[in-house]
C-alpha cells in the first residue's frame, strides 16, 4: 500500500481513524499516525465540546439578568443598585454548573438510600453549596476553557498548513 498523500511513496503506517496509508513523513506529523483530514475532524470535535461547556453558564447568566429585571419591576430601587444586583445574581447563577460539577467530582461515589424528602434536602444543600463554589470555580474554568480553545485553534492552523504541503 502507498501513502494516501504521496502516491509514489510506500506507506509505513495507517491512519488510526480511517486506515489510509501514511508514509514516514505523513505518519510523523502528529503524535499518532493520523491523516490530516481525520485529525482536523478530531480538533473540530474538541472545539465543539469546549464550546458546549459554556452554554450552562450563559443560560444561568441570562436567567440571572431576567430574574433581576423582573424582580426590579416590583420594587423602587435605584438603577445603580439594580445593575450591581443584576451582575452579582447573574454571576452566581452562571457559576452554579461549575460548582455542581466540582461537588459531584469530590463527593463520595455511593448510592444514597433516601426518602423523597431526603433527596430534595440533598439536592437543595448541593445546589446551595454549588452557588458558593461556582463563584470561584467559574472564572478558573472559563480561563482553562479559553486556553484549550486557543490550543485547538492553533492545532487547526497547524493541520491546515500541513494540508497545503
Image: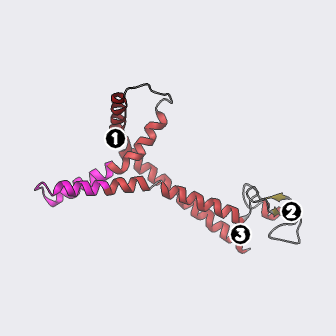
Quarter of the image with the N terminus is bottom right
Residue tagged 3 = 162
Q: Position of residue 107 (x, y in %)?
A: 46, 32
Q: Residue at x 31, y 55 (%)?
A: 63
Pick the front one: 19 or 81: 19
Q: Seen in the image, is 35 located left or right of residue 24? A: left
**CA separation in Å, label 2 and label 3:** 18 Å
Q: Residue furthest front?
A: 116
* Tag 2 and tag 3, C-beta contact below 8 Å: no
Q: Secondary structure at mark 1?
A: helix
Residue tagged 1 = 132
Sequence-earlier tag: 2 or 3? 2
Residue tagged 2 = 11
Q: Residue at x 46, y 37 (%)?
A: 104
In reply to whether residue 27 is colored magenta, the answer given is: no
Judge whether 60 appears above or below 24 on screen: above
Q: Seen in the image, is 28 located left or right of residue 44? A: right
Quarter of the image with the C terminus is bottom right
Sequence-earlier tag: 1 or 3? 1
Q: In the image, which residues are magenta?
A: 63-92
* Tag 2 and tag 1, C-beta contact below 8 Å: no
Q: Secondary structure at mark 2?
A: loop
**CA separation in Å, label 1 and label 3:** 46 Å
Q: Which colour style is shown?
A: secondary structure
Q: Position of residue 126 (x, y in %)?
A: 37, 36
- The answer to whether one can see residue 146 in this image is no
Q: Residue at x 81, y 64 (%)?
A: 25
In reply to whether residue 87 is colored magenta, the answer given is: yes
* Tag 1 and tag 3, C-beta contact below 8 Å: no
Q: Residue at x 45, y 40 (%)?
A: 102
**CA separation in Å, label 2 and label 1:** 56 Å
Amino acid at each position: 500500500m502507498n501513502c494516501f498523500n504521496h502516491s509514489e511513496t510506500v506507506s509505513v503506517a495507517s491512519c488510526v481513524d480511517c486506515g489510509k496509508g501514511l508514509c514516514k513523513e505523513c505518519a510523523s506529523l502528529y503524535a499518532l499516525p493520523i491523516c490530516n483530514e481525520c485529525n482536523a475532524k478530531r480538533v473540530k470535535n474538541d472545539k465543539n465540546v469546549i464550546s458546549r461547556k459554556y452554554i450552562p453558564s450563559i443560560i444561568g447568566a441570562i436567567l440571572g439578568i431576567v430574574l433581576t429585571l423582573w424582580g426590579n419591576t416590583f420594587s423602587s430601587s435605584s438603577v445603580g443598585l439594580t445593575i450591581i444586583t443584576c451582575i452579582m445574581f447573574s454571576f452566581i447563577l452562571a457559576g452554579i454548573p461549575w460548582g455542581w460539577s466540582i461537588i459531584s467530582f469530590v463527593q463520595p461515589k455511593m448510592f444514597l438510600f433516601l426518602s423523597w424528602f431526603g433527596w430534595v434536602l440533598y439536592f437543595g444543600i448541593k445546589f446551595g453549596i454549588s452557588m458558593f463554589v461556582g463563584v470561584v470555580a467559574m472564572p478558573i474554568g472559563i480561563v482553562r476553557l479559553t486556553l484549550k480553545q486557543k490550543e485547538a485553534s492553533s492545532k487547526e492552523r497547524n493541520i491546515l498548513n500541513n494540508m497545503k504541503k
